[in-house]
Amino acid sequence: MEQYVIKGGQRLEGEVVINGAKNAALGIIAAALMTDEQVIIENIPDVLDINVLLDALAEIGAVIERKDRHTVKIVGRVNTTKVDNESMRKMRGSYYLIGALLGKCRDAQVPLPGGCNIGSRPIEQHIKGFKALGADVDISFGMVNAKAESLKGGHIFFDIVSVGATINVMLAAALAEGQTIIENCAKEPHIVDVANFLNSMGANIKGAGTDVIRIKGVQKLHGSTYSIIPDQIEAGTFMLAAAATGGNVCIKNVIPKHLEAITAKLVEIGVEVTEEDDSVRVDASNTGRLGNTQIKTLVYPGFPTDMQPQMTTSLATCEGTSIITESIFENRFKYVDELTKMGANIKVEGNTAIINGVEKLTGATVCAPDLRAGAALVIAGLVAEGFTVVEHVEYIERGYEGFEKKLRAIGASIDKFDESDNKGIQKFKLKVG
Ligand code: EPU
């Protein structure tokens, strides 16, 4: 197992370039399967979840060619609709293969999705959508089996706002006969990105980014070249790392509009944030101790649940009491016990965390329980006095490309080691200590 070793106390300074959005890429890669023609996807992040999905595509017959680290060519001529890749069971984005294969082949057998352990994560809204298009769907032996003689446009009103269900039904409906109307849709930027990609392949999708998406099914999709939007959550994570360390960092290759909920909270606690066309500068170097705030995670454009652990962590050393309410996932405060080991004073009651700001955190060995909480523990390590070890970095690598390298380039004392590499760890400690 690999771990990060961090010596805290350095202000982050400089520039960091953000990669393409993981959660958009998952939908777009699945969508690429829906044409037999060549698709070129640019700005793909080189992270574990994406690489696992690309491997799964290759296993069902698609031709995958990495043109460079961030560009992939996909020819989605599949020879089976059964995805039996063991790794798929561990990731969430595998569910997009149901919508894509059902749309294209009218048949899909895909392992029930896993993903980060942050709540129960059912998929009944996805299934409701597929059924409204005329598919038979059942779950047996750990597989979701979806089949349709013919897929016909339908009218779907989601009971809850779901990113995954919105994208998944949009995928299947793109190749259904007639018009589909999906109401109570999620509006996250990556939903718009997947819709734009499908439209670039000849789909007819209108309204993505609003509550109602209208899709006129087409018979065939064609090849396309498309560049994925920047990752809003990676950008937000660096924004908070900069703020929490009292740093001054320019975060490049972002869409500032997508970051507004995060920017607004940073400004509220006293950080200076300057937006340019495709960058944001986060400057907390002259602000003294930051203030407190109250936040509720919400669907876009509200404060993203994927930024909740990083925000809670950043507020742990701010002045006064902050309150964070998690309204999307019921089990997303598991990392708080790890922060407590580092001296944080946070009390979790149900879906609310009450954060009493402490003067400082102190280094400890902590365990990343999932992707975003893992990133949050790294932020804690950057802020803490002394050395912090964050175990299970494989969670973090599911969604952050070269996380420790990017942090090192802006002044963090951090490196990655195998847990058995005592020599390397000692050498690092002597060097930075
Ligand atoms: N939900 C249901 N039934 C469904 C679908 C969702 O009850 O059929 C519930 C979920 O349990 C949750 C809420 O609805 O309480 C929202 O879930 P949503 O479907 O929007 O989330 P998701 O598609 O499972 C995606 C991202 C998550 C991100 C959420 C919310 C991917 C692969 N995952 O998950 O990303 O937290 O949307 O924005 O796109 C991450 O990147 O770290 C991550 C967890």
Image: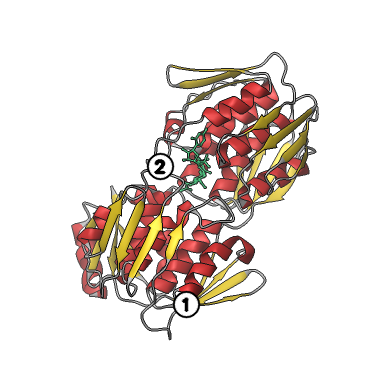
Residue 387 visible? The answer is yes
Q: Residue at x 40, y 35 (%)?
A: 120
- Alpha carbon separation for disc pair 1 and 2: 30 Å
Give the amino acid at mark 2.
Cys
Q: On the rendered structure, is 70 left or right of 120? A: right
Q: Position of residue 387 (x, y in %)?
A: 23, 67
For residue 271, above or below residue 368: below
| Relative to 63, residue 282 above or below | below
Q: Name the residue at the bottom extreme.
A: 286
Q: Is mark 2 within 8 Å of ligand 1?
A: yes
Quadrant where the C terminus is found in the figure:
bottom left
Res. 162 image quadrant? top right
Mark identifier at residue 116: 2
Report which quarter residue 244 is drawn in: bottom left
Category of crowding for the residue at label 1, using alpha-carbon neighbours closer than 10 angstroms: few (below 14), some (14–19), many (at least 20): many
Q: Position of residue 111 (x, y in %)?
A: 48, 26
Picture coordinates of residue 423, whole percent (x, y): 19, 61
- Provide the secondary structure element on which disc 2 rests: loop
Q: Residue at x 27, y 57 (%)?
A: 347
Question: Callout 2: few (<14), some (14-19), or many (20+) C-alpha neighbours within 10 Å?
Answer: some
Residue 271 numbered mark, or none: 1
Q: Is mark 1 within 8 Å of ligand 1?
A: no
Say left or right for 145 vs 310: right
Task: Residue at 51%, 52% (x, y): give it.
Answer: 298
Which image quadrant is residue 288 in?
Answer: bottom left
Q: Nearer the viewer, residue 375 or 16?
A: 375
Along the viewing direction, whichever of 75 and 21 lies nearer the viewer: 21
SS for dot 1: loop
